[in-house]
Image (tube, grey):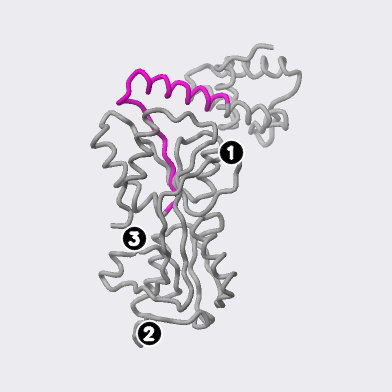
Amino acid sequence: MNINLRQLEIFMNVANTGNMTKAAKKLYMSQPAVSQTIIELENNFETKLFERLNRKLILTYAGEVLFSYAKKVIGLIDEATSTIEDISKAHTGKIKVGASTTYGIYLLPKIIAEFQKHYPNVEVEFTIDNTHIIEDLIINRKIDIGIVEGINYSPEIKSEKLFDDKLSLICSYNHKWVKTKKFEVTPEDLGSEVLILREKGSGTRQVIDDVIKYNKIPYKTIYSLSNQEAIKKVVESNIGISFLTQISVQEEIKNKKLAPIHIQNVQFKREFSMIYHKDKYRSLLFDKFVNQLKTYPYTE
């Protein structure tokens, strides 16, 4: 049985679009040519790879298995291509980086800008999402390096610590604590407060949930938002309080929109780490970017 990369590429595009015509347009092919390729694959495997549901092509179980392997094969080919280009042209190439929300918004752009001062011909493609998504992108070889908070548990991933970060309790400048100049509270003081937190799957949310559970901190209720800027705006409006890193609220604290509050005998600490696939080839370009991550002055 012979399967070539072009067939896998066509198969993956049909799976992603759920439509042969759309896949054909994306690949600059005719629709009959795409259809014939799928037929050839199904004949080779002697099983259906797609079924039609409401005018959309849906993967069968066999199709899902092939799709999983096809992603790995294409990912390995892309990695091999990048590696060969890196070896032959040390200062050119592409590196794909992913970061969890806090790091991605407030630190990664500065690091990429500094890196590209030294390597202007290197293309840095980056993705910002929650920790769970970034780990999935690493496992599926969609990105080369990830920067996330917390600890990962996948055996497919290797990690290297970058720095420690501290989360602070933040409230509106119109909150009763600020008005009464109460900038230090006890865990019990949170019992009547609404918490505005990141969504489940976020590394920040995991740290907060763990600390709240360990210290048995009471609270009134929790609202979940996936956007950190939205959380800040909600807290500014005095709807609730939150736990945010200082680097994300420096301007709001300076402008007296938000205020940091100390909780007695409780600390919300987290670790930021660089992660990559355990089978990742550490090319020259890869190591250059890793060095940029490790030498960045995070504590300044």
The structure residue drawn at horizontal position 33% and vertical position 32%, both measured from the top left corner, is 123
Left or right: 123, with 142 as reference point: left
Dot 1 or dot 3: first in sequence order is: 1
Q: Is residue 282 above or below residue 180?
A: above
User: How far, Cα to Cα, is label 3 from label 2?
Assistant: 22 Å
The part of the image, by quadrant, that contains residue 102 is bottom left
Bounds of the magenta span? 73-101
Query: Residue at the right extreme?
Result: 46
In this figure, which residue is indicated by the disc labeled 2? 182
Question: In the image, what residue type sits under mark 1?
Answer: Glu
Residue 214 within the segment the image draws in magenta: no
Residue 146, percent from left and from top: 46, 43
**Residue that carries the numbered disc 1 in the rendered image:** 156
Residue 274 position, x and y percent, is 45, 45
* Element type at mark 1: loop
Callout 2–callout 1 Cβ contact below 8 Å: no
| First of labels 2, 1 by sequence position | 1
Q: Residue furthest top?
A: 2
Residue 94: % across, % down: 37, 29
Label 2's element?
loop
Q: Is residue 256 left or right of residue 96?
A: left
Mark 1 → mark 3, Cα distance in angstroms: 31 Å
Q: Which residue type carries mark 3?
A: Ile
The crowding category of the residue bearing disc 1, from other C-alpha atoms within 10 Å (few below 14, some 14 to 19, many at least 20), is some
Q: State the residue in front, 7 or 95.
A: 95
Is residue 98 on the magenta stretch?
A: yes
For the residue marked with disc 2, what is the amino acid?
Answer: Lys
Vertical position of residue 17 compared to residue 130: above or below: above
Look at mark 3 in the image and give the residue it sits on. Answer: 247
User: Which residue is at the far left?
Assistant: 117
> Distance between the Cα atoms at labels 2 and 1?
47 Å
| Residue at image point 50% right, 78% down | 193
